[in-house]
């Protein structure tokens, strides 16, 4: 048996994703996106946020703010200036990672607007008795909890709520009826795939949440990081193909005798910066948990980052 050294040795090709890494990071400025939508970009670029958090303002006069962003004084000031002379009536949060929700608190204090979200960090898992990590914005508790099928109405705009767990268990997207567009948070991003980090992140839920978008008729997605996504249903279908191909790569690694996550990551992510391997390890763990749950892999005891994994005996 020859142990694979890199992804090309596996014989499992990943479908090419039409990613878009072009972007003009106009930090702190109001960028007009559409007749109803403006964006203010926070200066928090890194390997996971791309150029930073794009906070959206929807409406004119009486507005909603989506994903207020990180607790950075300059960003909060820029956002406050962007809505000067208007009334913020709603603050919508897709999920509670620290680059999305912390600025909701000072914005609420300034404007008096209510916050809307699925629930506090880990809400979708804690209901199942799962003790999630404390890596998010543990202070955020929405004034109004919303879930799948709920409708949020304002002056000149209407949002349909889509519960999309996977990246986090409390992730929710907001579909703007008036422009047939979807604010996709971190669920679907055009510049990169989404990190799924257990225990709060869940690959089975993530794939189901992607499938949920395919039959919908939105024509444009606005992720919180990166440019808008055009032809979104085609892009989502490619994301699903990509994840299935990753699992075939993992299965091939198991067949070739690689049983531990770090060794699998070194092969299937051989072409990316090793600094990103810890995050990749979390996604591989999420894939393996999904594969174990569906009988395509096995391990002794509960799946965790230190487990040894095998193909099931046939």
Image (cartoon, helix red, strand yellow):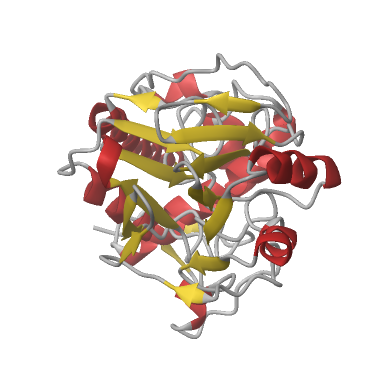
Q: Quadrant of residue 74?
A: top right
- Would residue 257 appear left or right of 266 to someone viewing this image? left
Query: What residue is rendered at 25% in x and 30% in y?
Result: 219
* Quadrant in which the C terminus appears: bottom left
In this orientation, which residue lies closer to the viewer: 53 or 115?
A: 115
Return the x and y of residue 53 as percentages of the image width and height.
Answer: 64, 39
One can see residue 150 in this view: yes
One can see residue 260 in this view: no
Residue furthest to the front: 85
In this orientation, which residue lies closer to the viewer: 274 or 31?
A: 31
- Would residue 129 appear left or right of 23 to someone viewing this image? left
In this orientation, which residue lies closer to the viewer: 116 or 46?
A: 116
Number of disc labels: 0
In this orientation, which residue lies closer to the viewer: 183 or 297?
A: 183
Q: In the rendered view, would you say 185 is above or below 149? A: above
Q: In the rendered view, would you say 139 is above or below 55? A: below
Return the x and y of residue 279 as percentages of the image width and height.
Answer: 64, 44
Query: What residue is rendered at 63% in x and 43% in y?
Result: 83
Q: Quadrant of residue 115?
A: bottom right
Query: What residue is rendered at 51% in x and 30% in y?
Result: 192
């Amino acid at each position: 048996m020859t142990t694979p050294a890199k992804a090309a040795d596996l014989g499992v090709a990943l479908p090419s994703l039409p990613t878009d890494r072009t972007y003009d990071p106009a930090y702190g400025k109001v960028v007009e996106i559409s007749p109803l939508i403006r964006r203010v970009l926070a200066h928090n670029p890194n390997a996971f946020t791309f150029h930073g958090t794009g906070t959206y303002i929807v409406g004119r006069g009486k507005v909603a703010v989506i994903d207020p962003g990180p607790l950075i004084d300059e960003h909060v000031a820029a956002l406050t200036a962007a809505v000067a002379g208007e009334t913020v009536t709603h603050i919508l949060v897709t999920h509670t990672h620290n680059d999305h929700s912390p600025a909701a608190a000072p914005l609420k204090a300034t404007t008096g607007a209510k916050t809307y979200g699925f629930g506090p960090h880990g809400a979708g898992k804690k209901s199942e008795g799962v003790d999630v990590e404390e890596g998010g914005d543990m202070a955020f508790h929405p004034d109004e909890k919303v879930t799948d099928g709920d409708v949020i109405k304002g002056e000149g705009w209407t949002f349909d709520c889509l519960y999309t767990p996977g990246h986090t268990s409390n992730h929710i997207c907001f579909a703007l009826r008036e422009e047939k567009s979807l604010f996709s948070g971190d669920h679907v991003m055009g510049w990169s795939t989404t990190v799924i980090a257990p225990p709060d992140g869940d690959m089975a839920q993530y794939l189901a949440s992607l499938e949920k978008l395919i039959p919908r008729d939105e024509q444009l997605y606005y992720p919180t990081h990166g440019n808008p996504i055009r032809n979104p249903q085609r892009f989502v279908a490619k994301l699903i193909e990509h994840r299935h191909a990753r699992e075939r790569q993992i299965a091939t690694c198991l067949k070739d005798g690689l049983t531990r996550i770090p060794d699998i990551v070194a092969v299937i992510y051989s072409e990316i910066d090793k600094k990103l391997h810890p995050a990749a390890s979390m996604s591989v763990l999420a894939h393996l948990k999904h594969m174990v749950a569906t009988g395509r892999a096995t391990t002794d005891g509960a799946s965790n980052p230190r487990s040894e994994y095998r193909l099931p005996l046939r």
